Image: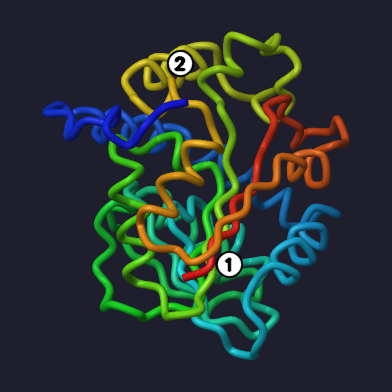
Amino acid sequence: MGRLSEIPFENESGSIKAAVTSYWSKRSGSFSEHKHDEAHSYKADLWRSELSERLPAGEGLRILDVGCGAGFFEMVLAPLGYSMTGIDLTPEMISQAKQLCGRHHAAAAEFYVMDAEHPDFPDGYFDAVISRNLTWTLPHPAEAYAEWHRVLKTGGVLLNYDAEYAKGFHKYDQAENLAHGNVEDSMVEECHSIYHMLSVSALNRPEWDVEVLKKAGFSSVDADISAGDRLYGIKDQFYMPDRMFCIRAVK
């Protein structure tokens, strides 16, 4: 199993983040359309139930969505009364999120261009941190986990949904990846090249994540590898063959 010491502070971190930002900038328009469709499908209720069952109890929780993309979680959760803040490294994604949420009952959500590894918020500011399909893009995921722990209140909850997408690229027939049905081949290859830039691509996950989160100071950490079966078991336009896991960690 990969160890924390195996994730170096790569000197090329800036170039990796530039490559990731460039990739998502080019995909921001089509990605926004895909999230619009997902938010208007049965998936919205599925995700709403999934998250509500795992978030802390209470009304008006302050939630940070790291790597918010086009604002899917904001569209799902803001109507329930949560105070949503989304951050993303890609300015085009933040622009798309503001536009989408402005039209879909989530106009109160706040969005900022910000690095997930260095969230610019005070200690203990949020009741929950949530994320989907972000950690695989980070040059320094252990640093990110430490920062997400920092911005959480005591008793706060981290919910991280991710998968071993780099390994899956070589494991699965990409024709099975229906969520990428409208993604050009050149963009698929660009994503593939990013996988090979990242140390996290070679780790055994979520085992590695659990270990690092415990070292970061979380009092309890649980990994659920059946999340993908619950959320993406149906082979529709949102389906990806990769085994999505959910990590729930309590500060």
Q: Which mark is residue 148?
A: none
Q: Position of residue 101 (x, y in %)?
A: 56, 67
Does 17 sit above or below residue 85? above
Q: Position of residue 15 (x, y in %)?
A: 19, 28
Q: Residue at x 56, y 25 (%)?
A: 165
Does 149 sit above or below residue 160? below
Task: Report the side of 64 relative to 38 (left or right).
Answer: left
Task: Report the side of 184 relative to 52 (left or right).
Answer: left
Residue at which label 1 appears: 74
Residue at which label 2 appears: 192
Do the residues bearing badges 1 and 2 touch, measured as CB atoms within 8 Å? no
Taking depth in this image into account, of 248 and 37 the one nearest to the observer is 248
Q: How many residues crowd around disc 1 within 10 Å: few (fewer than 14), some, or many (20 or more)? A: many
- In primary-sequence order, the first of circles 1 and 2 is 1
Q: Amino acid at mark 2?
A: His
Taking depth in this image into account, of 30 and 146 the one nearest to the observer is 146
Does 163 sit above or below residue 193? below
Taking depth in this image into account, of 94 and 149 the one nearest to the observer is 149
Please say which color scheme the image uses.
rainbow
